[in-house]
Image (tube, rainbow, N blue to C red):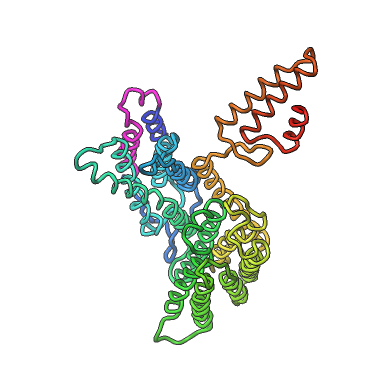
Amino acid sequence: MAFATQAESIGSSSLLRYVPRISPSIARITVAAALLPMALSHGNHGGDNIPEGSTISLDPIDTTLWIHIILQTFTFGILFPLGMVLGRRAGADNGAHTQIVKSRWHVPLQVGSTVLALLGYALGHLHKGREFNPENAHAKAATPLFFLLVAQIVLGVYLKLHLERGIHGRIRPFIRILHSVNGKAFPLLSWVQMLFGGITLLGFCQGDHLGQCAAHFIMGSAFIAYGVLLTIVLLVGQVWLRRTGRSQEFFDSAVIAAWGCVNTFTEHRWGTEWVRNDWQHTTMGIIWWSAGLAGVWLSKGRDGTPKRNFVPGFVIFITGWAMSAHPQELMTSAMTHAAFGYTLMAVGVTRIIEISFVLRDKAGVSEDGTQINSFQYVPVFLLYASGFLFMGATEEQMAFIAGSGMDAVAYILIMYSLAFLVFLVVMMFINVYDRAANPPSKITLNGHARSGDEAQVQDASEFELDGLMTDDEDDDKAASRKLLKNEGSQQNGFASPSAIARNDERLA
């Protein structure tokens, strides 16, 4: 409680009024300096109560640790990515170069996020109850992530000073790049750290379980990342994709081919005896790079124009079929793997239907990439769902669910719920960026877009003209005023052909 009070007093608006212009950044450094020694002094607990052969104690999770989990998940999963989105608003070309205009909420949001992250970091060392092995992955990754956060603060303070003379003018572009790259890396690093936190909390992925656990989490995260990228391309990336001169399937097939090469030579320990899973995983890698190369070839037409093709969808379908056929010892595991395989097969089928029948081999529904068919969301969401199902199907997780009394159907529904939540959050982030970078225009009845100022002027003109016409005026004056309004609208491109015809009749 003392730490929270101290953080609130440091970050309060009454104090910030009396410090210089860069006070938000200074406040972040002050909070970090205040909380870090207190947190580190408590260590990671000695682990004296951890049974031999285990990585966690049998103690329950206390309230402090729950607050740490919720606070850090909200901060690193929501606030920091939102701040990154608000910090990358694209400005208009001023004739010399394109300016990057950040939202005014970028700095306050990042300041608040940093304070909450440091508070959560301290709470992670102050909790009682369940103890963990001090050498766990979550604790090991926390320190580098903390120093990256400090580096981001320092870079942000430097950029906030607007030093552009002398050597600062030469190094400032590199500082801006480092600040941008570090900020973009935070969502990925935060995702990895949250996964480490989950497996550390339950004591999973240790000893002989490490290999299959890593495979599930890496592959599941890859499916979710693929879904995120397809969401970005679907909502805001059509223009960029057209500028590359490549189809979506070119990039998909290239990644599939590269990943297949890696799996071909890493799924089996060469020089040892071949077992059933080695054969399945290695041949899966072979079909991935074989099909990927074919997809790259099909992504170009005879004249060099980008072409759509079925290959990535088919590879995803055949991968889902293979995964659903993996033998499992537990019924819960068999049902979860089957749900994952069927979901991945549905991704492939719906992706092929989208390309071949919905879009008819076109890049999108409209040329400008702003129109989206509702069916296009189906394969994208199913990628999120398949990723969560695969991450949640490790041996230890399946044994834990089987012993908890929860049935497989309820567990699968929970995984689909998580997929919907992440799908929603990603679309919200993309919408925030899109509305900031490309403010929506007001659309008229005849389909022409008007900017905000033009719309206000036009609406005010129409309102004033309508107000001049009263019931006391005779028909000739009313017709003259209405004709004047129609002629003004015609000059601005808002008159319809029928209105013009009626005006000509009145003039006659």
Q: Classify 40 as above or below 360.
A: above
Magenta residues span 13-40
Side of 497 relative to 222 (left or right): right
Figure quadrant of the C terminus:
top right
Asked where in the image residue 170 lies, by quadrant, the reply is top left
In x, y percent, where is residue 8? 41, 31
Residue most toward the left? 166
Residue most toward the front? 508
In x, y percent, where is residue 139? 38, 54
Side of 317 relative to 110 (left or right): right
For the point 68% across and 25% down, the residue is 485
In x, y percent, where is residue 64? 47, 43
Figure quadrant of the N terminus:
top left
Q: Is residue 175 visible?
A: yes
Q: Main secondary structure of the magenta part?
A: helix
Asked where in the image residue 472 lies, by quadrant, the reply is top right
Side of 319 relative to 470 (left or right): left
For the point 76% across and 22% down, the residue is 479
352 vs 9, nearest the viewer: 352
Examine the structure image and report whether residue 428 is included in the region drawn in magenta.
no
